[in-house]
Image (spheres, rainbow, N blue to C red):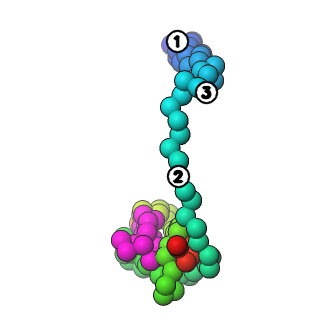
Amino acid sequence: MQRKKLCALGLATAACCAGLAAVAATPASSAAPAPVSRAADFTGYQLVKLPNANVPNFARRTVRCPSGKRAVGGGAEAQGNDAILVGSFPTDDGTGWIGLGRQNNYSDVGISVYVICANVS
């Protein structure tokens, strides 16, 4: 039984590699042109932190950018013995970041939230 699994894995790997080789061998002229995108121009980069605090499980913690700035990135961290980060995402209006989490066997969790802010043109 173990030999069959290894053989199947080896065949799948070989098929994958053959597919990659075919893609690599495709001439660039036959590929569809990549869409042209312009990176956002921004100044006034600033990292704003909401330090760790214990909150009830699934409670949202939100950190906001200073007035006139927009969130260009962010993140969150769940802290605790069995902490799980459930969500890390921008606010609907794009001026902050939200983090939430939970801990099994506990009614609260430590959450830190970070937002990267900038003047976006």
State whether residue 112 appears in this view.
no
Crowding at mark 3 (Cα within 10 Å: few <14, some 14-19, many 20+): few
Labels 2 and 1: the sequence-earlier one? 1
Q: Is residue 60 above or below residue 33?
A: below
What's the distance in space between the residues labelled 3 and 2, CA to CA? 19 Å
Amino acid type, residue under disc 1 in the picture: Lys
Q: Nearer the viewer, mark 2 or mark 1?
A: 2
* Secondary structure, magenta segment, majority class: strand
> Residue 63's spot in the image, x, y percent?
48, 80
Asked whether the residues under the numbered discs 1 and 3 touch, taking CB atoms below 8 Å apart as contact, a structural biologist would say no
User: In the depicted view, which residue is nearer to us: 99 or 37?
Assistant: 37
Does residue 58 appear left or right of residue 82 in this picture? left
Residue 28's disc number: 3
Q: Position of residue 84 (x, y in %)?
A: 47, 62
Q: Which residue is mark 2?
A: 37
Which mark, residue 100? none
**Label 2 residue SS:** loop
The three-letter code of the residue at mark 2 reads Ser
Give x and y (percent) for residue 6: 57, 16
> Which residue is tagged 1?
4
Q: Could you classify mark 2 by the number of other residues whose Cα lies within 10 Å: few (under 14), some (14-19), or many (20 or more)? A: few
- Give the label, 1 or 3, closer to the camera: 3
* Of 22 and 27, the residue lying toward us: 27
- Residue drawn at (58%, 67%), measured in percent from left and top? 41
Q: CA distance from mark 2 to mark 1?
A: 47 Å
Q: Quadrant of residue 44?
A: bottom right
- Percent from the top left, x then y, of residue 33? 53, 35
Magenta-tinted stretch: 87-103
